[in-house]
Image (cartoon, rainbow, N blue to C red):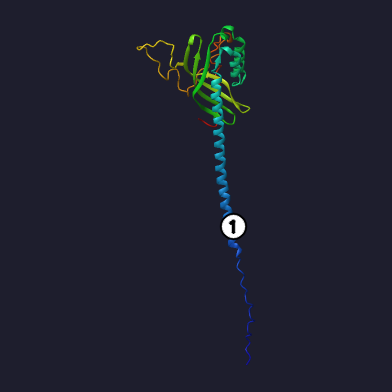
């Protein structure tokens, strides 16, 4: 007796696919690439911040060095060479206001002033940058200056003055476009004054108000009556830049 059920044809054997050995490698490489990219971004930001901070520090140092030199140049006067003294001052200033004042003063110097025998040298006791705008290349500095005056018959005098200087970068050199005295000059070791044991001595900080408080500008005196030993004054203070990007 023959069965109607036919035997099922044999099924072809499935050949196992070869494992993709490169896939784990690609995944690992992708992870490494992501980590490397993140590191580049992180260190790139850190490098940029470090570079920006260095650039600001370098700009501050440059402005401070030029401010110190300007304070010396603007406080040094030799009556025997008035033209040379004023020319030296002109190298440290910029802008019509300061330049015009010094040029008018130079024209108005009298023979009496030239023959006065007075000489003032200066040294900076301390200085600092109080405002700095690296974008506009402007800055404000405070300088404390010791003025040493000598004259005929052995006259000597040593005083301290404080000045606020408004600076701007001119072709790589920071120059003064406005200058304001802060308080009055204070005697330092007044050797010519008679010593009175009962006399009240001036306070060490007298005449030097807090450097953070603004002052009212002092109008420039008439050039014809300018004392050759006086520090060139200026007009109204320039308004503080509200966009200053970096403080002291």
Can you tell which quarter of the image residue 209 is in?
A: top left
Q: Which residue is nearer to you in this view: 106 or 165?
A: 106
Q: Which residue is nearer to you in this view: 168 or 230?
A: 230
Can you tell which quarter of the image residue 207 is in?
A: top left
Can you tell which quarter of the image residue 166 is in?
A: top right
Q: Position of residue 17 (x, y in %)?
A: 62, 70
Judged from this view, the residue extending furthest toward the left is 198
Q: Residue at x 54, y 30 (%)?
A: 61
Q: Residue at x 55, y 36 (%)?
A: 54
Q: Position of residue 165 (x, y in %)?
A: 54, 22
Answer left or right for 38 relative to 156: right
Q: Residue at x 47, y 16 (%)?
A: 158
Q: Residue at x 57, y 52 (%)?
A: 34
Q: Is residue 44 above or below residue 144?
A: below
Answer left or right for 203 relative to 178: left
Judged from this view, the residue extending furthest toward the front is 153
For disc 1, the marked residue is 29
Residue 108 visible (yes or no): yes
* Number of numbered callouts drawn: 1
Q: Which residue is nearer to you in this view: 5 or 32?
A: 32
């Amino acid at each position: 007796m023959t069965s109607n059920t036919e035997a099922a044809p044999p099924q072809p054997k499935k050949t196992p696919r070869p494992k993709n050995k490169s896939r784990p490698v690609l995944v690992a490489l992708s992870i490494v690439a992501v980590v490397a990219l993140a590191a580049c971004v992180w260190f790139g930001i850190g490098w940029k911040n470090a570079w920006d901070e260095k650039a600001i520090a370098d700009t501050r140092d440059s402005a401070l060095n030029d401010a110190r030199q300007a304070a010396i140049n603007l406080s040094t006067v030799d009556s025997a060479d008035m033209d040379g003294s004023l020319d030296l001052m002109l190298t440290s200033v910029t802008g019509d206001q300061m330049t015009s004042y010094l040029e008018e003063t130079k024209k108005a110097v009298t023979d009496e002033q030239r023959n006065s025998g007075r000489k003032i040298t200066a040294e900076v006791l301390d200085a600092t940058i109080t405002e700095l705008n690296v974008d506009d290349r402007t800055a404000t500095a405070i300088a404390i200056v010791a003025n040493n005056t000598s004259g005929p018959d052995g006259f000597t005098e040593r005083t301290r003055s404080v000045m606020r200087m408004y600076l701007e970068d001119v072709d790589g050199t920071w120059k003064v476009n406005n200058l304001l005295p802060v308080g009055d000059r204070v005697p330092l070791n007044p050797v010519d004054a008679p010593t009175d044991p009962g006399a009240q001595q001036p306070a060490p900080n007298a005449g030097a108000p807090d450097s953070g408080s603004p002052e009212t500008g002092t109008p420039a005196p008439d050039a014809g009556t300018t004392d050759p030993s006086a520090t060139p004054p200026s007009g109204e203070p320039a308004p503080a830049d509200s966009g200053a990007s970096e403080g002291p």
